[in-house]
Amino acid sequence: MTTSGVKLKLNQQRPFQLDVEIECRAGELLALVGPSGSGKSTILRTIAGLQKPESGYIHSEDEVWLDSRSGIHVSTQERQVGFVFQDYALFPHLTALQNITIALSYLAPGSRAAEARNLLERVNLKGLEDRLPDNLSGGQRQRVALARALARKPKILLLDEPFSAVDKVTRKKLQQELAVLRRTIRIPILLVTHDLEEASILADRLYVLHKGQTLQNGKPSDVQRYPRNALVARLLGHNNIFRATVEGHYPEQGKSRICWGELILEVELNEAFAVGSEVDWVIHPAHLVMHRRGRPSQGERENPVKGRVKELLDLGETVIVSLKLKEDETTYLAFTVSSHSARRNQLCVDAEVSVSLLAEGIHLMPRR
Amino acid sequence: MSLAFWTCAILLPVAVFCGRLLAWKQFPGKALVEAAIALPLVLPPTVLGFYLLIGMGATSTIGQFYYSLTGHHLVFTFDGLLVASVIFNLPFAIQPMQRAFEAIPVNIREAAWCCGLSRFQALWRIELPLAWPGVASALALTFAHTLGEFGVVLMVGGNIEGETRTIAISIYDRVQAFDNQSAGVMSAFLLLFSLLAIGLVYRLSYRQRRHDY
C-alpha cells in the first residue's frame, strides 16, 4: 500500500485498551486531544516504534513500519521519525549544536556541524550553539528539541505536548513559530495536546480520544461546534450540556422545537431526531447573548431565558457568568461577556439577567 | 595491585551490563538476583571463602574443568583468587552503576534511538557519559575493596608469595613475624589509598546528584 503520509491502525487490550485508526496526509497537522490515559502518547510512541501494539499496521509513504499479520516491526532507528518529547529529552552533557549533530549521522562527518548550524538558525537559535541544555530557557530547549527532531529528515514529526513546559507568553510564540515552520515541511505532523485552543489554532484536523478510542475527528471548528455526543462535548470543555425532548419539526419555518424543562426552545430544523425522542443538546457560550438593560432589541425574542447570576469570574478582559435559571433552579448556564459589557450592565451576584439562546448555536446530539 | 587491576578490568563490562539490566528491566526473580549480588556485603568473608574453596577445589566440577583446560588448579593460584575477587566485588561494582543508570530518564535513551543511534551507540555516546560518576565510583570502590580484602583471599588464595599474597595478607604476615615497621608502612598505604578512593566516590556522587535529570 502506498500513501503520501501516514496511515495506521492499532489495536491492543493490555496494558490498556487501544483501538484507533488514523490517517495523516503529508503536510497535514493532526492534533490528538483527550484526557490523561486516553492513549494519545501511546499512539505517538507506537508510531516511533518505542511500543508495540498487539495488532495493527503503520504505513508511512511506501514503507511498512508495522504489520502484525506479516510479523513486521521496524526498529525505531530505521523508522526515520522526528520526536519532540514532552520534557524535550535533550542530552544534558551535549551542547545545543551537539544535540543536533548526533542526529545527523547519515551525513558525512565534515558536513554535520554546518547542517546543525542551519537547523539551529531555522529555529531562531543562532548564537546559542555552545550552550548546554541546563543553560537554555524552556523555550530555547524546545527549539533545540524541534531542530533535533527535524535533523533526521523525518518522514513524520511527532510532538508530544511540546508546549506544556513553558510559560504562556513563550507558548504563544512557539506556537506561532511552529505554524510558520510547518508550511516549509511537507510531512505529516501529529501533535498531542490537552490544550484545545492550541489544537484549534495549529491543527488541520482534530482527533478526540477517550479510553483508547476515537470518539470524533474532523476540522477543529466543526468538532468544537458539532460534537458527536455529550461525552465529546464534555471532553471539549463545553459547560452548557443539557437534556431535552424533541417537541416537533416545522419545515416551513426551517425550525424544530425542543422541550427543555418547562421551556420550549427553537432550534434549526433537524429531522434526524424523532418527535418525542430524548436528546442531549449543547450551546457554545458564544451563542448566548445577554440582553442589555433598558435597550430591548429584536434578538431578545429568540429563546429568551431568565435567571439570576450565581457566580462571576473576572478574567481581566472577559467575565465568565454562571446563571441560575428562573424556571429550574438546579440548572446553570455559563457564558462569557466582555468586562466592559459586564460593567455597563451592572452585573453582580444575584442580579437578574435575561439571555437569548441563539437557535443557530443549539446543537442536538443523540443520547448515548 | 595486580589483583585489583584485573578485578576492575573484568568487572567493568560485567557491571555495566548487569547495572543497566537491573536498572531498566523488570523480570521475574529480579529481587532474588539483586539479593544474590548483595550477599558479599553481609556474608562473613570466611563463609564466602569456604564456598568458593569448595566450589573451585580440585575435586569440584569447576576445578576439574579448569584443570582440563589449563593444566593447573584454581585454588591457591592467582587465577582462582581473581575469580573469588570478582565474585566478592560484585555488589561494589554493580550497585553504583545500577543507581547511575537508574538516574537516566527512559526518554533520554528513547530520544537517542529516535536520533538513529543504535543501542550500542546510545550506550557509548549518551548513557555512559551520563553514568560515568557511577562507573568511576564503582571502579574506585572495587579497587580499594580488593586491596583491603582479607578473609576470602586467605581462604581461596592462601599466602603464597608472588602468587596470592595481597597487601592485607602481607600486613597479617608481617605482624605475625613481629615486623611492625613493614606492617605499619603497608597499613598506612592502605589507609591513605582507601581514604582517597572513598573520597573520590563521595565527590562523584555529589556530581551525580547535581546532574539529576
Image: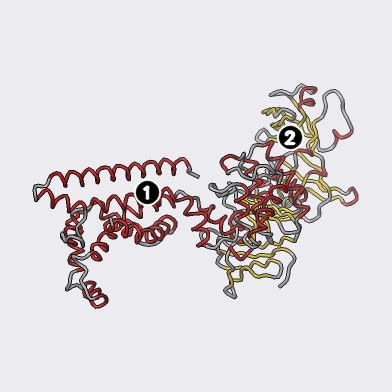
Q: Secondary structure at mark 2?
A: strand
* Disc 1 target residue: B137
Q: Amino acid at mark 2?
A: Phe
| Residue A130 shows in the view | yes
Q: Is residue A311 left or right of residue B133?
A: right
Q: Please report contact status of discs 2 and 1: CB closer than 8 Å, yes or no.
A: no
Residue toward you, B40 or A162: B40
Q: Residue at x 64, y 58 (%)?
A: A104
Discs 2/1, front: 1
Residue toward you, A227 or A161: A161
Q: Amino acid at mark 1?
A: Ser
Asked if both marks, 2 and 1, belong to the same chain, the answer given is no
Q: Which residue extends farthest bottom?
A: B68
> Where residue B127 sits in the image (x, y, percent)?
49, 54
> Where residue A59 sits in the image (x, y, percent)?
67, 67
Residue toward you, A344 or A89: A89
> Where residue A324 sits in the image (x, y, percent)?
69, 31
Q: Residue at x 24, y 78 (%)?
A: B68
Above/below status of A325 relative to B19: above
Instruction: Give the number of the disc on residue A99.
Output: none
Distance Cα–Cα, label 2 vs label 1: 62 Å
Q: Is residue A234 left or right of residue A75?
A: right
Q: Quadrant of the C terminus of chain A?
A: bottom right
* Disc 2 target residue: A335
| Residue A241 shows in the view | no
Report in which chain the residue with disc 2 lies. Answer: A
Q: Is residue A220 left or right of residue B132?
A: right
Q: Residues within 10 Å of mark 1 (few under 14, many from 20)?
A: many
Q: Residue at x 17, y 53 (%)?
A: B170
Q: Secondary structure at mark 1?
A: helix
> Where residue A269 sits in the image (x, y, percent)?
84, 50
Report in which chain the residue with disc 1 lies. Answer: B
